[in-house]
Image: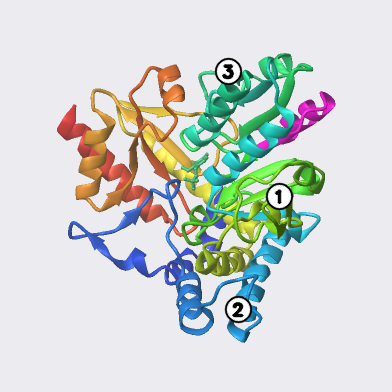
Amino acid sequence: MMEKTAVLEQFDVYGIRKDFPILTRTVNGKPLVYLDNGATTQKPLQVIDAIRHYYTELNSNVHRGVHHLSQLATDAFEVTRHQLKGFINAAHDHEIIITKGTTDSINLVASSFGSAFVKTGDEIIISAMEHHSNIVPWQLLCEDRGAVLRVVPINAAGELDMDAYRALLTDRTKLVAITYVSNSLGTVNPVREIIEAAHANGTPVLLDAAQAIQHIAIDVQALDVDFLAFSGHKMYGPTGVGVLYGKEKWLDAMPPYQGGGEMIKEVTFEKTTYNELPFKFEAGTPNIEAGISLAAAIGYIQDIGMDRIAAYEHGLLEYATARLLEIPGIRLIGTAANKSSVLSFLVDGAHPYDVGVILDKLGVAVRTGHHCTQPLMDWYGIPGTVRASIAMYNTREDIDTLAAGVQKAASMLV
Ligand code: PMP
């Protein structure tokens, strides 16, 4: 316990908070306590300044103009790609496809990998805790191809049933698509084991890292993962940009996802040839300011250090769990042994929405509802939860305000 308290104290959270201007504002006359980081994180000045810098100094289209500004914008955009490569330890810059976000990245794989490799009777494995973004694209693919979706079940704590997973892997399995961290439960899945078992079966794996990339150091080569999808806006970066990492051998073998400018080598009315990686998968003008300013978010995380962030957030999650469990009538949803940054809960006798409204009156931002995981909520037999999700700038005081608010809501509603 001494050690954990020391981690919380050594981390300069108050210094970090100074970089996030929005954290000083009030909501409903109360200081903002922002605990909806799973939905999106706030942005540091470094990112906000990078967006401003782009529009005041660089604004120009990328990858096409010979003129000075276009070169500068292109170079800055490619700096982000290179930084992303280092951030997740990809083998090559061209394995980093810049997309609109996690949803876009997963749809790209479902569409492109699906059209090349999935046939009637084939199977795709997902899990019971997936976000709709990692369910619906596979359902669309299965409908289109006559393929079958298989779902790995979970236990009451919200952990994957790994024996059931292994039993689902067969020669019909064409892809495993599973979340690294559950956005509703906080479960950190055993991704190494998942990947090893799939590879032993000759099956590639896509990890939805939307809730992992900002909390856990990820090394795609060490994991040997085939595809990794994540969003800029959940890692202190801008909205409208994200990443699909793919192993070169898969990306090379996959057809283009969308047609348009940038993704072509040569177009005639008879036949079009496609550009090389990564541009084959980047049709049209990207979100340039978001792509460029994402580099500032990555730099921000790297300066602090992912391992330090993870240790701090872990200590805060333990503190928050203990504080919430002091409240009579609280039921935690998601009690896996290995968790990250998410606290989903119910107050006995109160609807999650009503708890959320009372917390909002107190300046506390949480998410309520099904969190885009309706099948998971159905499995628990609940309409939804209240979800507090932590970021590196949250403090013990934030958690104390949350706990006091939940206590108040319980006394008003129950
Ligand atoms: N997967 C998970 C686990 C998520 O939490 C989210 C966002 N809530 C997504 C996918 C979708 O991310 P985006 O909306 O940024 O595409």
x, y percent for residue 70: 60, 78
Q: Is residue 190 in view?
A: no
**Amino acid type of the residue tagged 3 in the rendering:** Pro
Labels 1 and 2: the sequence-earlier one: 2
Q: Is residue 38 left or right of residue 105?
A: left
The residue identified by callout 2 is 70
x, y percent for residue 90: 76, 54
Indicate whether 53 appears above or below 375: below
Labels 3 and 1: the sequence-earlier one: 3
The residue identified by callout 3 is 153
Within 10 Å of disc 2 (Cα), the crowding (few <14, some 14-19, many 20+) is some
Q: Nearer the viewer, mark 1 or mark 2?
A: 1
Tell me the CA gap for discs 2 and 3: 50 Å
Q: Are marks 1 and 2 in contact (CB under 8 Å)?
A: no
Q: Residue at x 51, y 84 (%)?
A: 57
Within 10 Å of disc 3 (Cα), the crowding (few <14, some 14-19, many 20+) is some
